[in-house]
Structure formats: C-alpha cells, structure tokens
Image: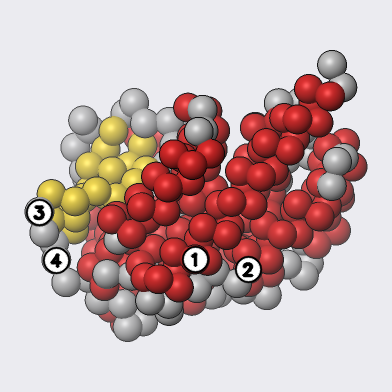
Amino acid sequence: MKTIDDSLNKSLGLALSKMEEAGYKISNRVSLQIDPSLRFMGYAKQDGNHHIIVMAEWALDSEIVEGFLLHELSHIYHTEKGTPSHKSDVVHKVLDDIVTREGLTKKEMQFLFDAFNHFQNIIVDDIVFEILNDERDIKQIQKFFVGWISDKPSGNSVLDTALLARNAFAVASLKRRNLYDGIEQEISAKNKQFLSILGSKGEEDFNKILHCLQHARCDKNSKEFCKFLSEYLEHIVSMMRRRQESWEDLR
C-alpha cells in the first residue's frame, strides 16, 4: 500500500477538528490507509477500538477528498454512538430475514445491500452537509449528485431497480438539504427520461423510494428502525421481482 503523506494526514486532522467543533467528536484513534486496487473511493473499518479509513489511490487527487473524509468520519461517529443504522447485529437481522424469506439470488442480494447503503449514507450525510455549507462546497455536492443520475435503463430488471434507487438517493440527498433548486431542471430531465423508458410504474416506484430516503431517521430505537428499514428494503425486492415478471411476460 502507498504511504500516507503529511498533507493527507493534515486533511484528516482538519476533518476530525471540524467534526468535533460541530458536536460530533470521534473518541477513538482514526488513521488512513491507501489501497491501489480499490475501484470505489473508500470505506471505514475497525481494528478493535482503532478506526481505519481506507482510500483508493486514484481518489487522492479528487476535489471532494474533504467530503469523503467527513463522510467516513460520520460513519465512525454513528458506529461509536451505537446508532441502530450502524449496529451490525440489528442491520444483518433485517437483511438476513429478507434474503432468506425471499430466496434472493446473489445479484439481488448485492443490489439489496447497495440499497441499504443508500439508506445508511443518507443518514450519515446529514452531518457532512451540516459541516460543508459554503457556496463552493454546495456546488461540488450538486455536481457530484448530478453525475449519479442515470438517464437510460439497462434492460435488466434487477440492475434497473438498483439504478432507480440510486437516482432516488441522489434526488433525496439534495431535497433533504434544500439543495435541489438550481439544478432541478438538469436532474429532472435525466431522471424523467430514465423513468419514461423504464415504464411499468417507474414513477410510482421512484416516488416510494424517494419518500423513504427523504424521511430516513437515526433517532429511532432498534425496533422502530428495523420496521422502517424492512419496509424500505421490501419495496426494493418487490420492484425487482415485479419487473422480472413483467419482462418474462413479454418474452
């Protein structure tokens, strides 16, 4: 793995300071690692009480490094706090119950986990958006989420459900923080094209997921959280299955 230079450690220190100043202090040690083989930007993991943020080598030159560090630190904060969305036993019980009950395929499981990540990420990003609030940060955030919007379905029922959920996550992320104005036309045009080609209740499905993500909350006890998360994930599975059945009917 590539070594961490002083500037990156300085960025981490600054991000930790901003978290603490905003009222989200990280109690335990946090360090960085670089993984040159990583295709996505990075993730956080634990080694006992030691938190490690693993970054892709290509991400080092990204203009959103600060946002990435704050995002991963927000995950770490919720993990330390014991938020239901970051309790592995609570989350895996919901996911395992759905996987077993529905008999999901490996690909369906993968996209179900992606859908959960959207749910978890929109909660932690409440902290990120609170800290990154100047005009330059807002423009970067808007640009980032515009790039997430798919405008053409793939024709694969499972993948198209995942793309629909990702579109909803991007729109919900902006609407949740009142950042949708100014880029609404660009995002709406791409998403409407996606939904019009998708057909088969695409707009209704999109609005269901959008509503779930806009109203996702972490201030719930484990029982309430499990109920809310289960309803959201069951929407995802239902969409996968219904689209698969519709596709087979057309064969």
Residue 136 horizontal/vertical position (percent): 58, 66
Please identify the residue farthest to the left as the structure is shown. 48
Which mark, by number, is residue 28? 4
- Looking at numbered disc 1 in the image, what kind of residue is underneath it? Lys
Q: Amino acid at mark 4?
A: Asn
Residue 174 in view of the camera: no
- Distance in Å between CA atoms under marks 3 and 1: 30 Å
The mark that comes first in sequence, 4 or 2, is: 4
Residue in the image at 49% along x and 66% along y: 227
Query: Circle 1 is placed at which residue position?
Result: 227
Q: Give the mark nearest the N terminus, 3 or 1.
A: 3
Of circles 4 and 3, the one toward us is 3
Q: Are marks 4 and 3 in contact (CB under 8 Å)?
A: no
Q: Which mark is residue 10?
A: none
Task: Between residue 40 and residue 192, name the one nearer to us.
Answer: 192
Q: Secondary structure at mark 1?
A: helix
Please identify the residue farthest to the front as the structure is shown. Answer: 101
